[in-house]
Image: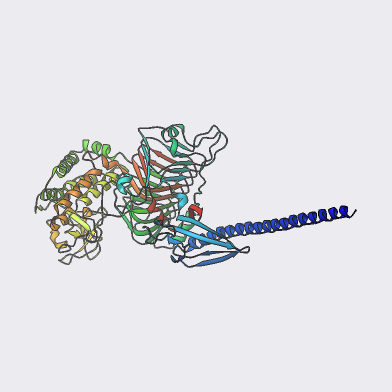
Amino acid sequence: MKRSRGIVFVSLLVVIVVVTMLTVAFLARSRGTLFGAASYRDGVRAEQAARGGVNHLIAILENDRDFISDLEGKLEGATYGVTFNPGNPYFSVNNLSNPGVSTQTSCQGYKVTGHTADLVVVGRCGQSRRALRVVVQQGVTAGRSVAAVGRVRLSGRVEVDGVTAAGDRADIFKTPMELNPEGQAPGGILSKYRGLSGGPPAIEWTGGPSFTLGQLSRLETAPAESGGQGVSTNLVALYPDKIVDQGAADAIPDIDVAAMVLAGMSSPPLPGGSTVIGYVQVNDQRSVSGNLTVNGDLMLSQGTLYVNGDLTVNGGISGIGALYVAGDVTVNGGNAVIQTSQPSGAALFVGGDVTLQGIDAQGYLDSLAAGNAPLADAVTKLRQGLEEYAEAQDAPTMWWNSVKMAKHLEPWDHPNSQTPWVSPIPGPNGTFNTGRSNGLVPAVLVHLKSIPGYASDPRTVKLIRALEQVQYHFRHNRHNVRQGMRSLSGMQLALTNDYRLAAVDPTGALSLISIGDFDTEEFVLGGNHWDDEGLEDPTTWTHDRIRHDSRPEVHKARRDAFLRYNPLDLSWLGSSSFQGVVYARGSVHADTRFRILGSLISLGDVQLTNDTTLIFNQEYLSLFGNSLPLGIVHAEEI
């Protein structure tokens, strides 16, 4: 009996020990589970706080692109922090306002490119920490050669590529690798068109000689309906690895252009009324109430123009500045291909549709010359002069050939019948180059301007503007005039609408001046006052300045650069270009050898036909100012 009781007692002790051990183990496990749950909860809250900090920081940067102050905040029991102090292991770098690469690398040792911010936000909750790194760029949603809400239709020869920067010269026929060998950028085409089942594709190439897509460029479309087509089958066959079909999620910004125009209508009116003949220069803020037609080039010199109506330019848009147009914009002809020292990068905001129409100017010139013997003779001599310029091997010959092209044919030969010629394109210092009307380029221009009604014919205007840029390339800038300056004899000078030299009498009336009446030496600026004095690149200097600087190798470099983009057959007369960014709330149509270096954004359809080139220039996104939102291009937890 006693033995049985002992066995029961021992068994009871064993059970108690086992239960105690199980209880301790259960309690330990429960404690670990509770701790793990708390740790998980804190980790989630830390991540949420970091994400909230990212949104907070981007909101601040939208209003202050130079923000570099420390930032702290709280979110549902967690905190987040941002610092720009490189002494902290998790620091941010703000390079949004700088077009170049930042001197400060990121906390991970990366270079921060222009108009970019490398941001690190650290969220904390309890013992948990989450560090989020995001790379933010301005206007990232428009970072394409073309971005459209509607369809993008292409035909003929098409080239699409991108560069990070292209410099400030009009070398628009360079390939992306030539523009910036170390800075290719992801250009490409984005369409947000939601393809319908059995309907047309969002991005379509109807065929032509060739379709070329840059190394980093892509064709991207938004999700379509079941059975809907994103990219046409011929493009899929050409570039199967460069297509993001029905996967693009980027948003295209909705900019209220009409409100911007109304806000700018308090600016002084643009002189000249609703129709202006000749070059229009805008170097401050101006406005036009109603439609505006420019029969010439619209040149921006850090200026802004607001048009509360439609804008028609029978010429090109060049320079640096901004245009805000409430209605439609039509550009007939565009800029010529001539290299000049003029910087370019225009921002064009349009409330309606945009039409960029190129012109077969070479064929039209030949047709005009066929029925006009003096013009035909002048065109023949111009071609001969270009050939001599191309064949010249020594600096004196190149210089003298440039004299014949732009200044005069024979040295110091000034017959009374010869009238002065004034280039309508101002040099970098604001002066206008002068020459004689028997120079090879001025002679052709004089005959074209003698055609009745030439100013209302976009084809003739296109020819004239292209040739005026040729004259600018060959200009000799030691005999320049300023608008309204006084001569040595006390007579005030002025330029007529077609840029002929005239004297102003006390009543304000103009009388044209001939060489016999008024020697050009009387209105020189005096000395070697080069209009390109501030330009560092010698290939942008005039041949006249290069000659006096005694640098024959630069003569050849400038000559070779000109011939590279302007063939001797004058075919370049019909090539058109636009440098900058185009934003249209309507549709965009570019036709006939039109080249866009920059970015094109449309809330409608985009149609590009008959030999079109689209080179996305990343640096031009800064031209939008604060109109485009900031966007995240990369995000990771570090």
- Location of residue 424 in the rendering, given as x and y in whole percent from the top left corner: 25, 54
Q: Quadrant of residue 237?
A: top left
Horizontal arrangement in the rendering, residue 106 relative to residue 249 (left or right): left
Query: Is residue 551 visible to us here?
Result: yes
- Location of residue 249 in the rendering, given as x and y in whole percent from the top left corner: 52, 46
Horizontal arrangement in the rendering, residue 335 relative to residue 329 (left or right): left
- Location of residue 553 in the rendering, given as x and y in whole percent from the top left corner: 16, 51
- Location of residue 69 in the rendering, given as x and y in whole percent from the top left corner: 47, 67
Q: Nearer the viewer, residue 172 or 576?
A: 172
In the rendered view, would you say 236 is above or below 541? above
In the rendered view, would you say 204 is above or below 284? above
Horizontal arrangement in the rendering, residue 330 relative to residue 28 (left or right): left
Q: Nearer the viewer, residue 518 or 219?
A: 219
Q: Nearer the viewer, residue 293 or 533?
A: 533
Q: How is the image coloured?
A: rainbow
Q: Quadrant of residue 517?
A: bottom left
* Count of picture labels: 0
Query: Is residue 351 visible to us here?
Result: no
- Residue at figure coordinates x 36%, y 36% from the top left: 157
Q: Nearer the viewer, residue 143 or 601?
A: 143
